[in-house]
């Protein structure tokens, strides 16, 4: 399951849904990786199927022995009691064999299934984490959660109870069919002929189930998306008294999901009902044709009894096959949805020569950065850059400017001018539509993403925190020592705040840091940036959530943090950027002015107008 050059078209998706074989091939690499664990379940099919086919014969032989009819060779010249004892012992052996081996086979199959689903979930998560931010802009979180959890769990049913189980059922049907043909071909052919229409009906109902199940999973994604959105925005929901309105929306989505599920239940039940009816017809047919043969002395009562049991046994695997086929169809629906996600292309990639050289164990002809280079002040050059989140709707137009090493530059402009878009392009969360961005003369597309992002630290207006302790939220999984963490906290004047927490640096934070204030979360973002000692520091309204006293402490720390670094600062409060080296003024994605604070005021342009408006407001 690898990403393709472009997402599949609607026609391609329809064709894939019609071809279960193609969907199976999507899973084959994962199945093949576990092939060493699959040989035991398949070997166990032989004794299990043989034991299942022998039981009706043994019962029939017991009846023939009691009625003094012709019996098998191993019962000849035996008394009634000794023959019955032998048959009971053989029947108990087959039952014990099935009980022991069936449990072992089920355990082995489910173990393999869990391994496969774990590998798929891991690969899917890795792929999603590699996708560009553009993908997350258009995809609800609830849909992604559904595909990573319930859809992958549906695949687990395919492997643990479906795939090998269907092979087992088919093998069992084959053994029973051969046994019946050897025992009495006329009754065998009649029962086998009944398999043709029932197989057609099962396939038809399962196709309808497949379509209904796909719609049900889409509705489940909508349900999860609605739930996630309301939980994430609970503050707004309660403040603006939207509880009843949102509950009505959720109820409507829930009803749509229920109606979709009802359709899957209908088709699933139709399969079971059809099989029950056919099984009764099969038994009736055996009694009718078998009775005629008994009257003609063509078969014995024992053989007729065996075929009555065979009629049940033949349709038991078929019934189980239908149940497992439902799981298979649910799994294939999940495969379609997961494949759609795997097929989303990874837009932001490292240079091809880097990828190939890594495969050879070397990074030849690729710009790499030493630790000193990562910490050095860097020249940033935007050369004729155009960018739009949608095709032909540009938010940045022909940007052309250079930030010298160590220069402190502020980006200013009305809302929607493109300031944050510049930061996203520089971090390569998006790629430019036209033009190029250079760091020290090297196009950022030619730099490994890891090296590019190690060269810079970004402090956003809302510092995101993960569930975990304070220390891990500063290091973010990198191997910094405790001393380095404490030094970074002291450099940014946040050490005193951390030490006041209940367990200091080991204080556990809830999801998104909800047990801290907005200002406290922002303080940790400064320590997170300081410990990385970057060559480029980016501040996007970084002090907006801080009170006056805390902001004064941070401003003092920032003076040290900005020293010998290239800095880009976005600030709506223009009074906070008066001392930067240069101010770039943007309007609707175009660079309209640049200069220092005093020069721009003297020009009397857009910057001067924005500054005067803010002064009037204060």
Image: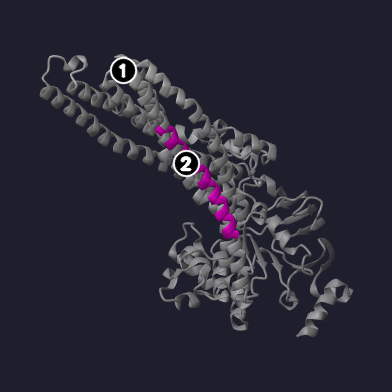
Mark 2 surroundings within 10 Å by alpha-carbon count, few (fewer than 14), some (14 through 19), many (20 or more): many
Which residue is rendered at x = 79% and y = 57% of the image? 396
Nearer the observer, 414 or 366: 414
Magenta segment range? 253-280
Per the image, label 1 sits on a secondary structure element best described as helix
**In the drawing, does residue 184 fall left or right of residue 207?**
left
* Mark 2–mark 1 CB contact (< 8 Å): no
Q: Which mark is residue 327?
A: 2
Task: Report which residue position mark 1 lands on.
Answer: 295
121 relative to 201, above or below: below
Residue 37, quarter of picture:
top left
> How many marks can you see?
2
Q: Is residue 544 visible?
A: yes
Q: Determine if the magenta segment contains residue 447.
A: no
Instruction: Give coordinates of residue 521: x percent, y percent.
Output: 55, 71
Mark 1 surroundings within 10 Å by alpha-carbon count, few (fewer than 14), some (14 through 19), many (20 or more): few
**In the drawing, does residue 31 fall left or right of residue 392?**
left
Q: CA distance from mark 2 to mark 1?
A: 45 Å
Which residue is rendered at x = 58% and y = 68% of the image? 247
Nearer the observer, 52 or 480: 52
Looking at the image, tell me whether mark 2 or mark 1 is earlier in sequence order. 1
Instruction: Give coordinates of residue 120: x percent, y percent.
Output: 49, 43
Residue 334, quarter of picture:
top right
Nearer the observer, 462 or 7: 7
Which residue is rendered at x = 22% and y = 24% of the image? 63
* Quadrant containing the C terminus in the rendered view: bottom right
14 relative to 308, above or below: below
Nearer the observer, 283 or 197: 283
Q: Nearer the viewer, mark 2 or mark 1?
A: 1
């Amino acid at each position: 399951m690898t990403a393709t050059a472009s997402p599949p078209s609607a026609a391609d998706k329809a064709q894939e849904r019609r071809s279960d074989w193609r969907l199976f091939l999507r899973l084959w690499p994962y199945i093949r990786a576990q092939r060493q664990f699959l040989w035991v379940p398949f070997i166990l099919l032989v004794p299990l199927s043989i034991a299942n086919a022998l039981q009706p014969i043994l019962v029939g032989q017991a009846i023939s022995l009691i009625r003094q009819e012709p019996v098998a060779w191993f019962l000849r010249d035996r008394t009634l009691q000794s023959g019955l004892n032998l048959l009971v012992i053989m029947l108990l052996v087959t039952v014990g064999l099935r009980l022991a081996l069936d449990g072992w086979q089920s355990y082995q199959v489910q173990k393999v299934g869990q391994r496969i689903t774990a590998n798929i979930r891991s690969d899917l998560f890795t792929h999603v984490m590699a996708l560009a931010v553009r993908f997350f802009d258009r995809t609800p979180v609830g849909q992604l959660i559904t595909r990573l959890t319930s859809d992958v769990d549906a695949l687990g049913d395919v492997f643990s109870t479906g795939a090998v189980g269907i092979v087992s059922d088919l093998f069992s049907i084959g053994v029973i069919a051969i046994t019946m043909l050897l025992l009495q071909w006329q009754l065998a052919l009649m029962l086998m002929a009944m398999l043709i229409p029932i197989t057609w009906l099962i396939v038809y109902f399962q196709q309808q189930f497949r379509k209904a199940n796909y719609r049900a999973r889409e509705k489940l994604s909508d349900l999860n998306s609605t739930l996630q959105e309301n939980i994430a925005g609970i503050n707004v929901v309660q403040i603006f008294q939207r509880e009843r309105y949102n509950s009505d929306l959720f109820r409507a989505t829930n009803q749509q999901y229920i109606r979709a599920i009802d359709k899957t239940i209908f088709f699933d039940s139709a399969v079971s009902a059809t099989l029950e009816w056919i099984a009764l017809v099969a038994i009736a047919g055996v009694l009718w044709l078998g009775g005629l043969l008994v009257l003609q002395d063509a078969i014995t009562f024992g053989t007729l009894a065996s075929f009555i049991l065979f009629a049940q046994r033949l349709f038991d695997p078929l019934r189980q096959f239908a149940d497992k086929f439902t799981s298979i169809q649910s799994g294939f629906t999940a495969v379609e949805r997961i494949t759609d996600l795997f097929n989303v292309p990874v837009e932001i990639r490292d240079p091809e020569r880097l990828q190939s050289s890594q495969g050879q164990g070397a990074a030849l002809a690729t710009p790499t950065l030493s630790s000193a280079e990562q910490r050095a002040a860097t020249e940033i050059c935007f050369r004729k850059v155009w960018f739009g989140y949608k095709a032909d709707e540009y938010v940045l137009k022909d940007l052309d400017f250079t930030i010298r090493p160590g220069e402190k530059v502020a980006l200013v402009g009305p809302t929607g001018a493109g300031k944050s878009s510049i930061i996203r392009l520089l971090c390569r969360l998006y790629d430019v539509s036209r033009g190029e961005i250079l760091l020290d003369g090297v196009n950022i597309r030619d730099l490994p993403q890891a090296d590019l992002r190690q060269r810079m630290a970004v402090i956003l207006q809302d510092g995101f925190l993960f569930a975990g302790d304070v220390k891990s939220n500063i290091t973010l999984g990198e191997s910094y020592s405790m001393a380095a963490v404490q030094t970074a906290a002291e450099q940014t004047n946040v050490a005193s705040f951390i030490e006041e927490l209940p367990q200091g640096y080991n204080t556990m934070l809830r999801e998104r840091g909800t047990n801290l204030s907005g200002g406290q979360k922002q303080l940790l973002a400064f320590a997170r940036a300081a410990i990385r000692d970057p060559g480029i520091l980016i501040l996007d309204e970084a002090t907006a959530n801080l009170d006056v006293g805390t902001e004064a402490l941070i401003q003092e720390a920032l003076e040290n943090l900005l020293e010998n670094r290239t800095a880009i600062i976005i600030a709506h409060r223009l009074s906070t950027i008066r001392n930067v080296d240069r101010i770039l003024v943007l309007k609707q994605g175009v660079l309209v002015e640049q200069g220092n604070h005093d020069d721009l005021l003297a020009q009397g342009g857009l910057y001067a107008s924005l500054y005067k408006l803010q002064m009037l407001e204060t």
